[in-house]
Image (cartoon, rainbow, N blue to C red):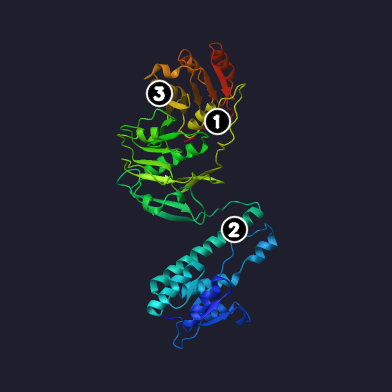
Amino acid sequence: MNVNYAFFERVDGPYSAFKDKLIQFGVKVYTVDDFKNVFDLSVEIKKSGGSDFQGIDLVVLELNAANQRLEENYILNSIEEWKISAIYSCVKNYRNSVIVLDPDDFDKIIESLEECGDITLQDRRMLSLKALYRILRYTSLIHKEMSELFASEKFETLILEEKTPLRYGENPQQLAYLSKIAKTKAFFDIIDEDTLFTLSYNNIIDIYTALSLLRYLDYRFAVRVHHGVIAEVKRSNFNFKNSRGVLAANFLSKELLKGLDGNDLDIVILPDFPDYPDLKIKRFIKIKEIPHLEIEKEYRFLEGNFLVQTPDDLLNMRFLSNEFDIQYKFANLIVSLSKSMACCIFKDYEMISLGSGQAEQIEALEVALMKAKKDPSSLDGAICAFDGPIKDLKIPDLIIGSGIKTVIEPGGVKEDKSVRKKLEENGIELVFSGRRRYKI
């Protein structure tokens, strides 16, 4: 294995400096102009490794990204068959002919040549794998464009990139790692890999739930999540003594830091300020901002099948009420991000209680009321939000006399008039949100 002859598709920009370095090592460089037919490049690659030391043993190409125009001739003419042929020829002959598609690999190749006068076998293998991935992505992008053009989306390619192993899965006996769709921005890019490596599967779910809620809240809040359940949403009166799970806040105050005394939290996430006091917490993560990515589809894997749906729009909430209260939105966001059936009681910019993950809506209300009645005065004037329409007429009966003054639900069912009549006769306002927010 050695490098004697190289082919460069481009010789400008970073390619020029790489070419000049190879020439200093005695490598003879060819370009497109040296070939009457670029398909002959594959023939020369196959010669590499022969006893006559002929053939191209290093190939530097560029694969184009997605096309700018959704037009048949434009897309078809952009397909560069000779490059695909050359890449496969290099992969088949990887021990003797190196394929390079990423300028980020130039420095590593030069370092290898300076250290041992050649490109190591392991580097050749990794470059071949990288080239195969690039072909896969290149082909999937063309397929996506032509599927859209031909109005046929029967097949879809998802390429997953393993980001980092996790401490363990949902349980210690389960292995787990975090993946992302390759070459795209992902939510957990905000956290470095060394930190992610210390987290469990459950930690990841809790962090995502807490930060997802925070990014939709327009005010300063602290959110605690434990085992995927929203446990606390507060703006003041912080007391996290013996609390567990993940706590995330979009602000910093002395009162919040004081509230962390005696906590048993797994992770605390706070804004990225330069100086923090010595916090007695297990894991501390600082973030500059919470990402809000434009996601076209949501996927759930079910043993060989994928459930696919468009994401719910939680930014544009509307409420049919004469007097809009921003707390309607906060309560509705909490039930929207909780497991159905969900019922949230909210008052004075604070979540009083949450019932979620119940089989029936009335059971979610009963759980929320039971939690709230630890402090009976907390229900006076409170808001009660549901993620689905009220169909059980026993629900208004439970709410009446509790102190709750406003009920929020999607509406749109035949029971709406009866529910409204019962509530309004007892001085309770019914506000329709217009959209069901179930989440399984």
Residue 334: where, in percent of width, then height?
A: 48, 31
Nearer to me, 101 or 79? 101
Dot 1: element: loop
Nearer to me, 291 or 123? 291
Residue 119: where, in percent of width, then height?
A: 42, 76
- Name the residue type under label 1: Arg
Identify the mark nearer the N-term, 3 or 1.
Answer: 3
Q: Quadrant of residue 373?
A: top left
The answer for how far apart the CA atoms under marks 1 and 2 are is 35 Å
Q: Nearer the viewer, mark 3 or mark 2?
A: 3
- Name the residue type under label 2: His
Dot 3: element: helix
Identify the mark nearer the N-term, 1 or 2.
Answer: 2
Q: Quadrant of residue 313?
A: top right
Q: Is residue 92 visible?
A: yes
Q: Nearer the viewer, mark 1 or mark 2?
A: 1
Nearer to me, 269 or 197? 269
Residue 383: where, in percent of width, then height?
A: 50, 22
Identify the mark nearer the N-term, 3 or 2.
Answer: 2
**423 sits left or right of 257 in the view:** right
Dot 2: element: helix
Nearer to me, 352 or 307? 352
Residue topped by disc 3: 367
Task: Identify the residue at the far top of this view.
Answer: 425
* Mark 2 surroundings within 10 Å by alpha-carbon count, few (fewer than 14), some (14 through 19), many (20 or more): some
The answer for how far apart the CA atoms under marks 3 and 1 are is 20 Å
Mark sitting on residue 143: 2
- Name the residue type under label 3: Val
